[in-house]
């Protein structure tokens, strides 16, 4: 696609006024009697954790257990985006470049979204399973969202931006392609909000965290209005946004899909008399470390120094996950601080790997993000 490519402006669909089409609008808004305890238990027992099955549960069966199952999927979805975006960001040599700044902002947003999902789950009496829910790469998005999409780890390339980063963040109403009939991340979050509205659960602030993540303030959810606001921010910032490019948040940053599109097209998106086009300020594609695509089951027969770097990275990554688990299991901000400290320790071994050439190839190694057992 050229820098002059035009995008079709999607219709405005806000989280607070739409229902996901994948399971039928009536399933989300139909009035129903509260589920019995037996129905609640049966629902919890049969939920597989896939979005399609969650959305197929009739409204009458969407009780607190349904919300907990859905929010665990949300935790896994948000977590799954962070490793590929980190690999892309680490591979950029100049962190001051426009592309690097765009990716870094999205990483901060995704960490905030993970915090929101965890707070929501704790609010309804659940406990996030972060280490147990850590994704395997390459692989699909958790919950069966965007079936057919394979998320892999690689340095930043135009194909990686298009095939992974933009594909993950595809809006409810894609800008220039047919979405199909499968549920999007936006559909899923809409269903979660409608679940809160149907169940009207008592929300507990015990165990929720309050801290600043990137440019956002993570706060406990105390009311349904808090839930609506939190989910609305998640959708509008990134996954599943139905916003027009003209719509932006108070920070005036483009949603993730548009940010990645600017990297892909090499220009900022601007409104012209012929519609929205990538004709704004140049976004030069940055010079990158040539990290190769990590194969299934990881690197084959690496040298001893590379093996040590991989093990060091995966050990630190596992510490990040276990610390995040602890943070929402009563460890609070102390455990969150340990997670942040460990996350900062990921960069050094990652960069060493990205600067180590694979024998017989022009590309380099990179982190595998294997959670150790």
Image (spheres, rainbow, N blue to C red):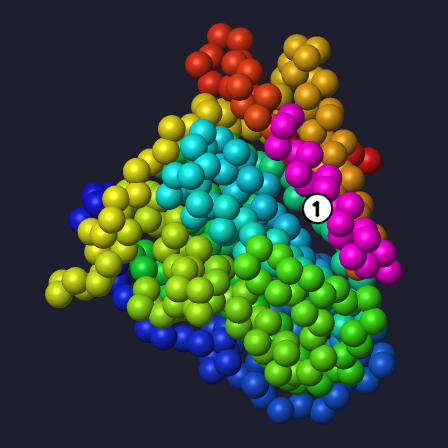
Foreground residue, 362 or 186? 362
Residue 235 lies, with reference to residue 371, above or below; the image says: below
Mark 1 closeness class: few <14, some 14–19, many ≥20 residues within 10 Å:
few
| Residue 2: percent from left, percent from top | 21, 43
Residue 34 seen in this snapshot: yes
Q: Where is residue 296 in the image (x, y as percent from the top left)?
A: 60, 29
Residue 347 highlighted magenta (yes or no): yes
Q: Quadrant of the C terminus?
A: top right
Residue 73 visible, this angle: no
In the image, taking residue 185 as reference, residue 277 lies left or right, namely: left
| Residue appearing at x 71%, y 85% in the figure | 200
Q: Does the magenta stretch include residue 124?
A: no
Per the image, the residue denoted by label 1 is 340
Residue 55 shown left or right of residue 121 in the figure: left
- From the viewer's side, name the closer residue of 302 and 118: 118
- Give the quadrant of the N terminus: top left
Q: Give the range drawn in magenta.
A: 329-349
Q: Main secondary structure of the magenta part?
A: helix
């Amino acid at each position: 696609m050229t820098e002059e490519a035009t995008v079709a402006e999607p219709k405005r669909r806000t989280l607070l006024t739409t229902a996901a089409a994948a399971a039928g609008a009536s399933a989300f808004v139909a009035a129903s009697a509260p589920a019995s305890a037996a129905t609640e238990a049966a629902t919890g027992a049969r939920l597989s954790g896939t979005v399609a099955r969650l959305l197929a549960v009739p409204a009458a069966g969407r009780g607190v257990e349904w919300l907990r199952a859905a929010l665990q999927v949300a935790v896994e979805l948000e977590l799954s985006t962070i490793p590929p975006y980190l690999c892309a960001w680490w591979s950029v040599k100049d962190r001051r470049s426009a592309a690097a700044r765009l990716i870094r902002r999205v990483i901060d947003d995704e960490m905030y979204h993970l915090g929101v999902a965890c707070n929501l789950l704790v609010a309804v009496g659940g406990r996030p399973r972060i280490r147990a829910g850590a994704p395997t790469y390459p692989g699909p998005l958790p919950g069966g969202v965007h079936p057919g999409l394979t998320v892999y780890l690689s340095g930043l390339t135009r194909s990686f931006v298009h095939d992974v980063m933009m594909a993950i963040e595809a809006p409810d109403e894609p800008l220039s392609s047919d979405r199909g009939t499968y549920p999007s991340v936006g559909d899923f979050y809409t269903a979660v909000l409608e679940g809160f509205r149907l169940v009207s659960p008592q929300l507990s602030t015990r165990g929720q965290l309050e801290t600043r993540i990137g440019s956002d303030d993570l706060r406990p959810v105390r009311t349904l209005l808090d839930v609506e606001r939190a989910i609305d921010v998640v959708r509008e910032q990134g996954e599943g946004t139905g916003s027009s490019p003209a719509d932006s948040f108070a920070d005036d940053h483009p949603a993730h899909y548009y940010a990645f599109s600017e990297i892909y097209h090499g220009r900022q998106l601007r409104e012209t008399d012929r519609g929205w086009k990538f004709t704004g300020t140049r976004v030069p594609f940055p010079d990158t470390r040539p990290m190769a695509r990590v194969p299934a089951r990881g690197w084959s027969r690496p040298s001893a120094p590379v093996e040590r770097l991989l093990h060091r990275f995966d050990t630190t990554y596992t510490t990040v996950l276990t610390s995040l688990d602890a943070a929402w299991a009563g460890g609070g901000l102390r455990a969150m601080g340990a997670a942040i400290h460990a996350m900062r320790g990921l960069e050094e071994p990652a960069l060493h790997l990205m600067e180590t050439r694979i024998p017989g190839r022009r590309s380099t190694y990179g982190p595998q993000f294997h959670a150790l057992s």
